[in-house]
Image (tube, coloured by chain):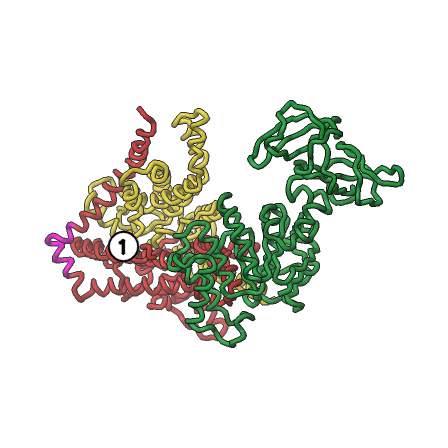
Chain colours: A yellow, B green, C red
Amino acid sequence: MRGRLARQAGIAATAVFALAMISPVVLTAAGAFSDSEWYGQRSEGAGVESTGALFRYVIEIWGRSLLRSAQMVGAVVPLALILGAPAAWAFRMRPYPGSRLLEAAALVPLGVPGVALAFSLLQTAGGAPRFWLLVVGHLAYTIPLVIKTVGNAVDTFDPRIEAAARSLGAGPLQVALRVTLPLLVPALILSSLLVFAVSWGEFNVSFLLATPLLQTFPAALYMTYTTNSFPVAAAATVIFLLPVVPALIAIQALGGEEFHRGLQA
Amino acid sequence: MKVRGEDLSFAYGREPVLSGVSLELPEGGITVVIGPSGSGKSTLLQLLAGLLQPTSGGILFDGEDVTVIPTERRDVGVVFQSYALFPHLTVRENIAFGLRTGRHRISLRTSRRRPSRHQIDCRVWDAASLLGLERLLDRRPSELSGGEQQRVALARAVAPRPSLLLLDEPLSALDARLRRAVRSELAALLSRLGTTVFYVTHDQEEALLLADHLVVLNAGRVEQAGPPLELYRCPATPFVASFLGEANLLEASVIEGGGRQRLETPLGKLATCHPGPERRGWLLVRPEDVIEDAFGTPATVVDSRGLGPYDRVVLQLEGGTEVLAHFPPETAPFPGATLRVGVRTRRPHFLSDGSGSGPRGR
Amino acid sequence: MNRSALQPWTGVLLTLPLLLFLSGMVLWPLAMLAARAFTDPGWEALREVLAAGRYRTALLHSLALSAAAAVVSVLLSLGPAWVLARQRFPGRDLIRTAISLPLTFSGVLVGFLMVVLLGRIGAIPKVIGLLTGDERFSGAAYTFAGLFLAYLYFEVPRAVMTLEAAFRRFPRELDAAARTLGAGLLERLLRVGLPLAAPALRSTLAVTFSASMGSFGVALILSKRFTVAPLEIYTEMTGFLNHEVAGALCLVLAVLTLTADRLLTVRVR
């Protein structure tokens, strides 16, 4: 049947497309685990001859950046949720004059290039502790994701569900803790994963705002790409991907649709 | 157009939806398919429309096998349950949609070319005025009420003058009052069109009002098909009896006496006109056929509710069987009262035990 | 006190931290950026940026590259997005995850991947060399084509995901309705599919366009001569410490991106 054939051809083409998309990633990862000449010389000397040594070497030279990225994510994820989630709920369930404007303003950074925001932050608050300036930059681009994800979840609520809880005698606090919060748990998990993935990979803002000691891991990747041999760069890339892949799989499983919006390369 | 479905089966994966459904739609008549949700009635409509392919069986339009002909080349019009109006087009453009694609249509093949702009305008106007949509032509679907959308969906389906019009629960999205008003309009309109109509519903009043030919579907099979009143009066199975209207199904056994067969029922002994081989079965008594009878069975009134045109009375017969009766309001007894009841003997209908599943409680 | 009278205040209270953060950390700095550009010496710099020269060229490069990559990536993504949204098949989630993987990649990483594929000792030239004995496309990553390809690489996942979400919301019945009215595949695509998909296409263009307007990692790795605006900002800022020009460039870039975003996502009847 013609329709069936077209369907299968479409699926096959999509599979090939996906394969093409990940092929450079796979090639890179292979480079970190193979000692074939094909992947080029290791100019770092005898310390990086084996795969294990290669990874040890990368962690040795970029360990500080890894730690910075971990600290960054550790600060950005909870802050983005605290700033974004209650507001997302309020925008839909307790709107007030001007709340729509605020919601629109929260999405503005999505349309502002990272360099521009980073530069303007540096100009107005350059004296602030740099670590927190970096956190602010990350928050500007991750809060919109929280607002959209949590907002979408709130949209699916039956608007009378809180009224129902109140008619059963629950006070506002009880409604929040026993009805609203449990219903929002999946969206909050999804938001955390999204914020994590974005913050972990963020380069534009971090690179411009960070002092040399504060460089995050994506910035370290830049250094390694420009100074190290291919196997070292490949190993660093693999370390970068290590937490990203499970996060992405979880995001897909949770149906994270807003993920792509506002991610700048 | 004469439409036949022969031994149609359809399954979603391994789950059978329709199994061996055969039916024939009378030319120019309204065939109504009724059944509970999940009975496969919408699937049957989609098979006739060509939106789904049967896993086995065939579909004939005027004797021609169209089973593998795609929808767009079948001469059909469909009114969808959700109306499926094109949100980006005005009412006028929605109605004209099928006229502009018309080159495949048998009904437009006479001129061997697409109809001219003028022809299209005329056809749109015809369809719009048929449904009273003249003033709404430049609106968009989002600006219409539910009833108006329903009329646009119908106008769009009939504008290309299809030989087979398929309607999938077209009134189910309307509220009860509007549904009642639109129902009679629709009945008049459909008979005026003279097209062969296939109409899917789960509403028995709608079915009885509209149908020339009624098909009762249950769990993917045809329970019974025929003229609607025949199905109402002489259902072949307890399912049909209780699905079309309210029904009392009383245990009945056939007894021989004096060369005549009679039915022994909780409502007394009754003469039967259906002497079959079976000895046990069910007597169908419609609530309106339960009457006060000085020589009848003693009964106690359990509950009585006035519904306007009649009172709905639940009676408990001597022996414990509960029976539903419709009494004229002025004669209706109060709860607790005792009285004697019988059956209007004009039409006792006996369903033998072998006829399908047991009775559905009412 | 009446509880319903209290309700708007809960809204204000819950959004107050966000309001403070946004106004202090996003809107105020951006406003200052604009204010500086319109007062001397920023005004001078803004005029310099907009006059013919290196800066304007960089801005035009960014615009052209982003627009072209946005359009091409949307075209490339239509098919896969449709298949992912409308077909069920084993491995679909795996394929979707594979396509979405580059979403988290910074431009630098994307640039590196391009080098892996098409650098001077890239995989593609090597494979071609093995097959034909003649290594072709070596160093293509550093050409304009390589840059364009890299932009496509990070835009395609964004386009596929946005379009897929839109296609999944696409009412199936409308397609069925068009078929029953006699419309063939092409007619359905042109008269129903495209008009209905238009808003999704526009917002996808907005997403991909703004993603590339802000990208400078790719150019940082790949670009030898060809410069884009974010890269220029970076150079002015860190290399020459020319903050007036950097600020003016930032402003123009932000205004261009936000305007395109608005134009593309604004509702049209």
Residue at the far bottom: name it. B112
Mark 1, residues whose alpha carbon is within 10 Å: few (<14), some, or many (≥20)?
many
Q: Amino acid at mark 1?
A: Leu
Q: Where is residue B268 shown, x and y percent of the image?
A: 78, 32
Residue C232, percent from left and from top: 24, 59
Closer to the camera, C26 or A162?
A: A162
Q: Chain of mark 1?
A: C
**SS at mark 1?**
helix
A18 and B30: which is toward the camera: B30
Q: Given the current orientation, which residue lies at the most extreme left position?
A: C40
Which residue lies at the image location 64% right of the left edge and 42% below the top edge? B245
Which quadrant holds residue B71?
bottom right
Q: Is residue B25 left or right of residue B154?
A: right
**Residue sitting nearer the eye, A57 or C269:** C269
Residue C45 lies within the magenta run: yes
- Residue B203 or residue C65, whichever sits in front: B203
C145 inside magenta stretch: no
| Position above or below: B266 against B275 | above
Q: Is residue B82 left or right of residue C228?
A: right
Which residue lies at the image location 22% right of the left edge and 48% below the top edge? C30
Residue at 45% x, 38% y is A158
Which residue is label 1 attached to? C258
Residue A43 at least partly seen: no
Please name the predominant secondary structure of the magenta segment in the image: helix
The quadrant the N terminus of chain B occupies is bottom right
Residue B159 is at least partly visible in this image? yes
Identify the image quadrant of residue A3: bottom right
Q: Is residue C199 left or right of residue B298?
A: left
Give residue C43's position: percent from left, percent from top.
13, 56
Residues drawn in magenta: C35-47
Image spot of residue A190 (x, y percent): 43, 43
